[in-house]
Image: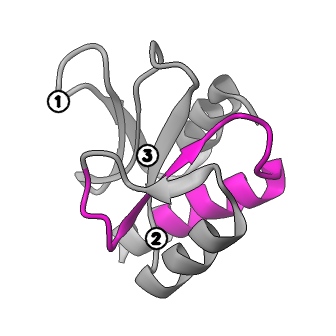
Amino acid sequence: MDLPDVIEHCLKLPGSEETTPFGPEALVYKVGGKVFAITVPEKFPPSVNLKCDPDRSLELRDQYEAIIPGFHMNKKHWNTVVLDGSVPSKLIRELIDHSYALVKK
């Protein structure tokens, strides 16, 4: 899954919106005014920050080198997923949906 696919998936979720509260370089995806995903399109390799259940965050970080503690985020609740092709697309979609669901609660 590449960054355009991630962005497309984020925008397909009901009530989601793309904003730029940190400046034009960071795309922030919100639902109900709350952040569920952040990416910086110019960054290489591309990545996305996603909210995650703390226990699941640790499991994912142990399983995948491309899933690391959230860059510039609360590391207990956020992961950065590096989009280098090593994390299955299906899992990335699930993690976007999981982040969205946690924030929408």
> From the image, which quarter does the N terminus lie in?
top right
Measured from the top left, where is residue 99 in percent x and y?
48, 64
From the viewer's perspective, tell me whether residue 91 is left or right of residue 30. right
Q: Read off the residue under disc 1.
A: 21
**41, above or below 9, in the image:** above
**34, above or below 6, in the image:** below
Going by the numbered disc 3, the residue's amino acid type is Ser
> From the image, which quarter does the C terminus lie in?
bottom left
For discs 2 and 3, the disc positioned in front in the rendered view: 2
Q: Read off the residue under disc 2.
A: 52
Going by the numbered disc 2, the residue's amino acid type is Cys
Q: Which residues are magenta?
A: 73-99
For discs 3 and 1, the disc positioned in front in the rendered view: 1
Measured from the top left, where is residue 5 in percent x and y?
70, 31
Q: Read off the residue under disc 3.
A: 16
Task: Report which quarter residue 42 is drawn in.
Answer: top left
Is residue 96 located in the magenta-colored stretch of the structure? yes
The coloring applied to the image is: one colour
At numbered mark 3, what does the secondary structure look like: helix, strand or loop? strand
At numbered mark 2, what does the secondary structure look like: helix, strand or loop? loop
